[in-house]
Image: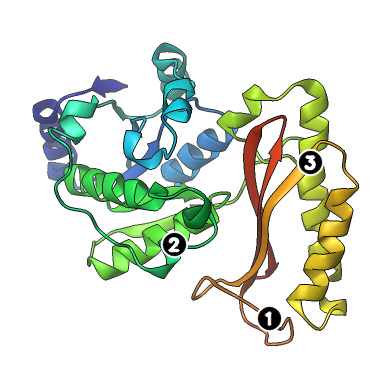
Amino acid sequence: MLSVNELTSLEEELSKASKKGLKIGLVPTMGALHDGHMELIKQAHLHSDYVIVSIFINPLQFNQAEDFINYPSNLLKDSNKLKNAGVDLLFNPDAKLIYPKEPAVKIDFGVISHKLEGAFRLGHFEGVGLVVMKLFNLIKPNVAFFGLKDLQQFILIKHIIKEFSYPIKLQGVITVREKNGLALSSRNAHLSPSGIKIAAQIYKGLIWAKNNFETFKSTDELKVQLNDFYKKQEGLSIEYCEVLNLNKFKPLKSLKNGKKTALCIAAYVEGVRLIDNIFLRE
């Protein structure tokens, strides 16, 4: 595996891959790699010829400086994982390469970026969108791989690719979970063993919703029942719980319309913020 952190070397390797006619797959990450990232890489091997993983902790998508400072980072450990996973190239730029100076241009990515995560983490998706566009411009992948655990992020990137006419195929990868159902996340490392058990109740509630949503006429009725379940879980605090039309990422009132539907949730356990989702109707 090659590891590059500056633009000239990146361009040289991309040129070699292009001359060989290789389909380039990109897996953007912020490091702290876990089995969820490994599944992204596995899918990248299946759907592309040359796999690039980027590791860049993007300061613009953190709305609290403390979260950025405390974000786990272990490049050596991550690099070893990537080598074992057969990754072709690790792109690990520093902040000066991605942001030579404070961005003078700000992009409003529309209503998708303003709700749910966008409403509770102001500026988050503006930061995500900007860094993803920069990575797309620098690497020019044929396929990009993103996890569906961050469903709103996935929908936003799908919107960006369409809106800015990127010749990139977007590949969503299913959420990888612990045996107890907890979605894998770098944030899980901040939970105690008892916190892990509490956090697993998030997915338990989502499964209940998927199995029972057709018995409810409205999303409000479903959310009342689901929130009642969560309130009984000591140590679990719900920030939002919303049923959405996946095509437009807009809240739904009725569950009888047959549209692609997902239930998204954000919660706190032991001060750690966790997100998850489930497709009610594929």
Residue occupying image coordinates x 64% and y 41% = 274
How far separated are the C-alphas under marks 2 and 1?
A: 19 Å
Res. 235 in view: yes
How many neighbours does mark 1 have within 10 angstroms: few (below 14), some (14-19), or many (20 or more)?
A: some
Say which amino acid is labelled 3.
Leu
Element class at badge 3: strand
Q: Earlier in the sequence, mark 2 or mark 1?
A: 2
Viewed as shown, does residue 213 lie left or right of 134?
right
N-terminal of the two: label 2 or label 3?
2
Dot 2 and dot 3 residues touching (CB under 8 Å): no
User: In the image, what residue type sits under mark 1?
Assistant: Lys
Mark 2: secondary structure: loop
Residue at position x 47%, y 14% in the image: 77
Say whether residue 175 is left or right of residue 146.
right
Q: Which residue is mark 1?
A: 253
Q: Earlier in the sequence, mark 3 or mark 1?
A: 3
Answer with left or right where residue 100 lies relative to residue 76. left
Q: Position of residue 39 (x, y in %)?
A: 54, 39
Q: Secondary structure at mark 1?
A: loop
Residue 236 is tagged as: 3
Numbered badge on residue 39: none
Badge 2 density bin: few <14, some 14–19, many ≥20, Cα 10 Å: some
Foreground residue among 190 and 147: 190
The residue located at (86%, 69%) in the rendering is: 212
